[in-house]
Amino acid sequence: APVQPLVRNRKQLESLLQQVPTFANPQSRWEQYATPGEVAASWLYDAKMRWNCFTAEQSVLDLGCGPGALMTGCLALGSGYVCGVDIDSDSLDLCRSNLMELFSPGNDDDDNDVSANWDLLQADVTRLSAGLVHQRQFDVVVTNPPFGTYSDAKLSHKSNSNRRNKKAGQSTSSKGIDIAFLEAGIAASCGLVFSLHKTTTMPFVMHRARQACARKLMSNDDVASAMVEGRDYSVSQVANLRYNLNRSYNHHLKESKDIEVSILEVAFLR
């Protein structure tokens, strides 16, 4: 029998996602921040209402799944299959535990057993283009990527060793990783992509999304037919959300910070 949705409305979804355990020791080099339950619920439920997505016939890919809040939401809304990808083994262990707790046999009605309907893959999302996950196309891709603001220079004083590492090309920076996640999502999707970004970066993010859509078509040997926005695909900023980001790392100076984020939506129309 088809998997039945575990939630019927936004409030139920938010209540469920607020119960998902999150990072115990977030890693700054991967910019690990939990997706707040209210943000994830609003994001996913609104997407379902607009596109009738996350159905039993659809496959979903979550890039940078972390503890699994978005995966949980996609499964709870009725998705037939969800694959989560993350570089961090500890995050994947927590994600697996969270999903098994919610969706393993015996925890709910047998009709709602979706324990066989999800997989986890440990991989670097930025290097997935020719990897396993791109051997198939997913109906929906969701991603809450790192914001791309991490730099080891922020985490230490400008010591001699830090300067030597920088000169040697060994310094670490996540600049541009949000775009890399978005591009990986566009490459892997045959239908919809939903990605969370800082609102201030949206004009640039939307520009790069359009470029990635054009590259996707050309990679399919359809160069003769130019990809036209509005006919072949759409790129939209569909929601602006605010939430308080609690102090997670030592280099954070405030106990919490008000963050404004936006949802980028890419839809392939043919």
Image: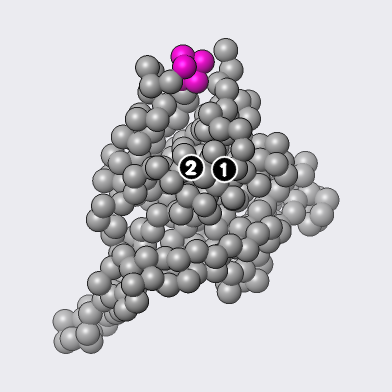
Could you classify mark 2 by the number of other residues whose Cα lies within 10 Å: few (under 14), some (14-19), or many (20 or more)?
some
**Label 1 CA crowd tier, 10 Å (few <14, some 14–19, many 20+):** few
Q: Is residue 258 magenta?
A: no
Tell me where residue 192 appears, x and y as whole percent.
65, 45
Q: Amino acid at mark 1?
A: Lys
Q: Label 2 is placed on what type of residue?
A: Ser
Residue at 51%, 33% (x, y): give it.
75
Judging by the rendered image, the residue that carries numbered circle 1 is: 11
Secondary element under disc 1, as helix, strand or loop, is helix
Q: Position of residue 183 (x, y in %)?
A: 56, 55
Tell me if residue 112 is in the magenta stretch: yes
State which quarter of the image contains the C terminus: top right
Q: Main secondary structure of the magenta part?
A: helix
Relative to 222, does residue 176 appear above or below in the rendering?
Answer: below
Pointer 2: what residue? Answer: 15
| Cα distance in 3D space between marks 2 and 1 | 6 Å
Q: Are marks 2 and 1 in contact (CB under 8 Å)?
A: yes
- What range of the chain is rendered magenta? 109-113
